[in-house]
Amino acid sequence: MLGKRLIYLRGNLTQDRVANALGISRARYSHYETGRSEPDTDTLKKMADFFNASTDYLLGISDSPCNTSLNLPLLGSIRAGTPLLTRENFSGSCDVPHYFRADFVFQVTGDGMIAAGILDGDYAVCRDAAAAQNGQIVVVLKDLGTGFSEAELKYYFDNGKTRYLRAANPNIPDIPVEDGYHIAGLMTGLIRRESPGYHVYRDYIHSVSGEDWAEVMEKAESYGITPQQLSTNLDIQWEMAKKMRGKE
């Protein structure tokens, strides 16, 4: 039960992140999740503090963590030049699981993060932050020049020369952070109210492959052709075409 509860509470955090917070090695923490070993009392209390849950919940004695949810502000129209977590920027509130360790929520628009599984209409749960590490999903604000700023989700990268933002959609080019953007938070979780329909998968294929290739892939799938079979058939066709050209 402890291992299952730890995996559940860890959410999208890495084992390294949790292990560092507990002051133990990742391998040792991994053994707790797999049930290969049991933590001592001191480590168990550290786990409870880190996840904001009771030790009874971790051990399976209770089915309810000490704090089941957080009521966080839901961002609305963001006024340029104001701190992000200003009441006038809120359009309501949202209850989220406590283990996200977040400060605010905002609704995602567009398909910029579709390849990361973040869809239009999802609610991104985020922690207030002004800096990030490579590969993290950040909330960035862009001044629209209308008195308001727009919040977006992007991957953050710093190659030592340039800081840039990358969408999880190959059709959207990278953006230098210096182009009027600034980091306002880090994404810690995701809330989706409805299960994604098939059209989401189709739109994703279109975004990463282009419409023509997406139609080919869907047709192959409908015929029961696996990617390996399609690749083999293409190799055969290519070899036949080379032989025909050689006879001309």
Image (spheres, rainbow, N blue to C red):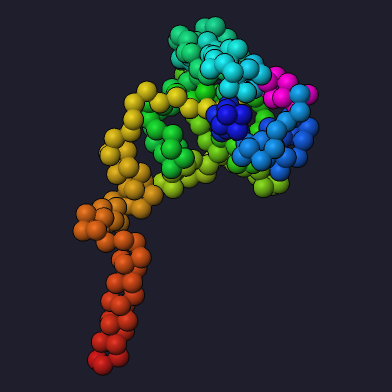
Placement of the C terminus among the 4 image quadrants: bottom left
Left or right, 131 with reference to 145 = right
Residue 68's spot in the image, x, y percent? 54, 14
Residue 112 appears in view: no
Left or right, 173 with reference to 39 = left
x 34%, y 61%: residue:
227
Residue 104's spot in the image, x, y percent? 55, 17
Dominant SS type (magenta): helix
Relative vertical location of residue 46 with respect to residue 31 in this rendering, above or below: above
Residue 50's spot in the image, x, y percent? 69, 23
Task: Kindly give the residue lying farthest to the bottom in the view shown.
Answer: 247
Task: Kindly give the residue lying farthest to the top in the view shown.
Answer: 87
Front-most of residues 175 and 8: 8
Specify the quadrant of the image occupied by residue 43.
top right
Residue range highlighted in magenta: 42-50
Front-most of residues 39 and 125: 39
Specify the quadrant of the image occupied by residue 121.
top left
Front-most of residues 149 and 63: 63
Placement of the N terminus among the 4 image quadrants: top right
x 37%, y 23%: residue:
193
Residue 89's spot in the image, x, y percent? 51, 11
Relative vertical location of residue 50 with respect to residue 213 in this rendering, above or below: above
Task: Kindly give the residue lying farthest to the front in the view shown.
Answer: 61
